[in-house]
């Protein structure tokens, strides 16, 4: 089965009923998508398939012929974070980080789909399938709304790499 | 379970390229597992709860078309997100299950087969189901289909357009459980139709003839709704007790009927 992951052609050797989550984590070493509940409820495995957020744990390889998959690894890197990633940082919208890749991708897709600043209720609806056990969601909603408005607080906290003095 | 899965050969996977191929591969349904959107079956495969001999995949079978207006023709592999865009109420509201991602992947055929939220909405609209399986293709009322859906491959739905509709649901917000209680009502040319779902885990939705009779006899919504307890036999399950369901049902039916009044 051939599909594109983060702009690169990939030919999977996994069986047709293997989940995309397994292919990403075990075959490609892309561990941004998290194996949480693994039955579609928690949202932590969410990736973009042809631009739409989808649960990689519910998607089997046999459905991916020619698909374009985007994982959190392609959103940005420590020196060039995406707007949504910057907003999550500025608003302290991540704590343990387990739900964050799914949240970031679903929020990025929402903002791109709407093409305008989003209302808080729209974020609640779009991220309703993503569980966060740390933040209480308020800061996540703040961050997504701010990112959609192009607002920057200019209060970027240092990244873990910067704290450790590692050059990205 | 794990030992048997390790010993079992890999399932044979067929990606059907047309409706005819899907019907031929499905045959009488024996020994075959169908994947439409995969939201129900994939976790069962992942966790080893099922390990079928053969799997039929529907994503390329051409069963995802929506056409017509009255009746609306809806393919069995249409996603709930696509259905919610075009369906009349109460079907559109029923299709807006949690969450965004699941609606974009889950299919109408799968939802109806496992006792999902669409059943009561399809009942009150007088929908018919076209399916294949043992004995060949058949077109039947939704109520007949959901009484015995196993061994049938859902091909499409015929959904007549009502004059008005309303949908009320009690569920755990943003959870992937079945709804606690679902009430669908529709005004059609021959009067008001009422159906409820979520009476127990995996129990099919049922029409409510006592409520419909009371309404056609001129009873106001709240009074007519009280007779819903004559039409249903709620059960205890992990979501709610039979007692709770019996208490809440008349309230939700009344609420749906009041919304229908406003919508007409």
Image (tube, grey):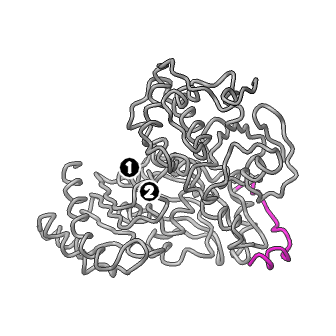
Secondary element at tag 1: loop
Q: Quadrant of residue B119?
A: bottom left
Disc 1 marks which residue? B88
Secondary element at tag 2: strand
* Residue farthest front in this picture: A164
Q: Quadrant of residue B58?
A: bottom right
| Above or below: residue A146 compared with residue A30 | above
| Above or below: residue B190 compared with residue A76 | below
Residue positioned 51% across, 59% down in the render: B157
Q: Which range of residues does the magenta coloring cover?
A: B1-18
Residue positioned 12% across, 68% down in the render: B219
State left or right for residue A76 relative to residue B193: right
Q: Quadrant of the N terminus of chain B?
A: bottom right
The image shows residue B186 at horizontal and vertical percentages of 30, 58
- Residue B250 in the magenta stretch? The answer is no
State left or right for residue A33 relative to residue A61: left
Which chain is disc 1 placed on? B
Which chain is disc 2 placed on? B
Residue positioned 71% across, 64% down in the render: B46
- Residue B7 in the magenta stretch? The answer is yes
Q: Nearer the viewer, mark 1 or mark 2?
A: 1
The image shows residue B55 at horizontal and vertical percentages of 74, 66
| Above or below: residue B24 compared with residue A95 | below
Query: Mark 1 near mark 2, Cβ–Cβ under 8 Å?
Result: yes
Q: For residue B159, which numbered disc appears in the image?
A: 2
The image shows residue B251 at horizontal and vertical percentages of 21, 66
């Amino acid at each position: 089965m051939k599909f594109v992951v983060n702009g690169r052609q990939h030919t999977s050797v996994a069986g047709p009923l293997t989940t995309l989550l397994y292919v990403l984590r075990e075959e490609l070493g892309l561990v941004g998508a998290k194996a949480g509940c693994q039955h579609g409820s928690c949202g932590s495995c969410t990736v973009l398939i042809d631009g739409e957020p989808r649960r990689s744990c519910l998607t089997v390889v046999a459905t991916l012929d020619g698909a374009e998959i985007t994982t959190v690894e392609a959103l940005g890197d420590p020196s060039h974070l995406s707007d949504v990633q910057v907003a999550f940082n500025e608003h302290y919208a991540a704590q343990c980080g387990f739900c964050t890749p799914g949240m970031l991708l679903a929020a990025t897709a929402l903002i791109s789909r709407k093409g305008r600043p989003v209302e808080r209720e729209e974020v609640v609806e779009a991220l309703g399938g993503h569980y966060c056990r740390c933040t209480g969601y308020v800061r996540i909603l703040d961050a997504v709304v701010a990112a959609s408005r192009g607002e920057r607080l200019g209060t970027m906290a240092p990244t873990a790499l910067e704290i450790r003095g590692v050059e990205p | 379970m794990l030992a048997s899965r390790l010993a079992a050969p890999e399932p044979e996977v067929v990606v059907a390229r047309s409706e005819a191929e899907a019907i031929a591969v499905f045959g009488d349904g024996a020994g075959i597992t169908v994947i439409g959107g995969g939201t129900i079956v994939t976790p069962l495969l992942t966790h080893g709860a099922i390990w079928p001999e053969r799997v039929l995949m529907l994503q390329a079978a051409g069963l995802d078309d929506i056409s017509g207006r009255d009746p609306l023709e809806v393919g069995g592999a249409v996603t709930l997100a696509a259905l919610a865009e075009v369906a009349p109420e109460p079907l559109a509201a029923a299709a807006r299950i949690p969450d965004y991602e699941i609606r974009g992947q889950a299919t109408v055929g799968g939802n109806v087969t496992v006792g999902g939220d669409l059943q009561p909405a399809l009942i009150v609209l007088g929908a018919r189901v076209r399916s294949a399986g043992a004995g060949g293709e058949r077109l039947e009322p939704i109520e007949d289909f959901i009484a015995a859906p196993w061994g049938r491959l859902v091909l499409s739905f015929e959904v007549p357009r009502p004059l008005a509709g309303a949908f009320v649901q009690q569920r755990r917000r943003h959870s992937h459980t079945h709804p606690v209680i679902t009430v669908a009502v529709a005004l059609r040319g021959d009067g008001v139709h009422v159906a409820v779902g979520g009476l127990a885990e995996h129990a099919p939705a049922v029409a409510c003839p006592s409520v419909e009779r009371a309404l056609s006899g001129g009873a106001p919504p709240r009074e007519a709704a009280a007779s819903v307890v004559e039409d249903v036999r709620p059960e205890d399950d992990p979501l709610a007790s039979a007692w709770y369901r019996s208490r809440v049902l008349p309230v939700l039916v009344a609420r749906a009927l009041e919304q229908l009044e406003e919508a007409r």
